Image: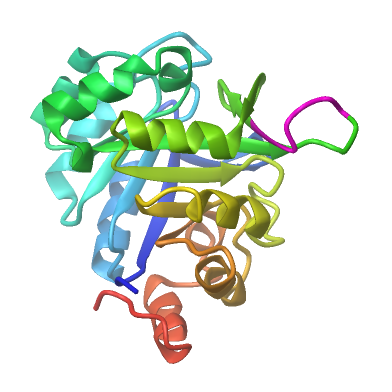
Amino acid sequence: MNAVRVIPCLDVKDGRIVKGVNFVNLKDVRDPVAAAEAYCREGADELVFLDIFATLESRKTRFEWVKKVCEVVTVPFAVGGGIATLEDMQTLFDLGVNKVSVNTAAVKNPELIGEASGRFGRQKLVVAIDGRKNPPGSGLPRLEVVVKSGNEATGLNIVEWAKTAEKLGAGEILLTSKDADGTKAGYDLEMTRAVAEAVSVPVTASGGAGKLEHLYQAVTVGKASAVLAASIFHFGEVSIPEAKRYLKGKGIPIRI
């Protein structure tokens, strides 16, 4: 097993870090630059910044806060939200961003994955997949892809979409359960494992982390290559060093 990455997720709205439950009821948390500095000091392996309203508001990621983060961050970081063209990606890379994350744009235009991978290299391309569970008999996939910050159903099966994204050139998958997001009840292990076992690229588990045990379950049961969390880190319930010590104590290889 490769070293498991521990990644804070920073959702950005109007230039501020926010956090909600099931993608709604957002609360202001802190300044993105201050958060980036703090998490880098604590030993985060990577950071993920998502401009969560960019697609809903039909706009690009606001570059002002990205520029400020680039000036202070000392670990690799990805930016997502409102990224729909190769030019958008190039602008972010020119600023100093290490990876870009595409979600809605990739579902609407799958060719974008191959074009981006071919131009920038698949190691710089994250395909983010937001998913939900549908009840039996609904006529919809049990594990369904949703887009536009979870507001629009697609009818796409999550596992099949993940396999397609990998085939087209995705370097990794960032998988978030809308149902589990912000609940602190644990990752959707069924969803995480189904995707992780279907693709060969790294899968990051996202949505639902509430305690240290959930991080361990994401790796051992969900087969995730990385664990991403927001609430427990933002509100000081778990620190990055604490998470790493716990995982290491459980025999999970982590980055020092």
- Between 11 and 162, the one lying in front of the other is 162
Query: Residue 60's image quarter?
Result: top left
Query: Residue 70's image quarter?
Result: top left
In the rendered view, tell whether residue 39 sits above or below residue 112: below
> Relative to 248, is 219 on the left or the right?
right
Q: In the image as oriented, which residue stretches furthest toward the bottom?
A: 249
- Between 216 and 28, the one lying in front of the other is 216
Residue 167: x and y, percent?
A: 35, 34
Q: Does the image show residue 28?
A: no
Q: Quadrant of the C terminus?
A: bottom left
Q: Say which residue appears at 53% left-offset and 51% top-offset.
A: 206
Residue 203: x and y, percent?
A: 43, 52
Residue 140: x and y, percent?
A: 77, 27
Q: Say which residue appears at 36% left-offset and 40% top-offset.
A: 49
> Relative to 161, is 42 on the left or the right?
left
Magenta stretch, overall SS? loop
Q: Say which residue appears at 49% left-offset and 49% top-offset.
A: 198
Magenta residue check for 200: no
Q: How is the image coloured?
A: rainbow
Q: Does the image show residue 116?
A: yes
* Part of the protein shown in magenta: 138-144
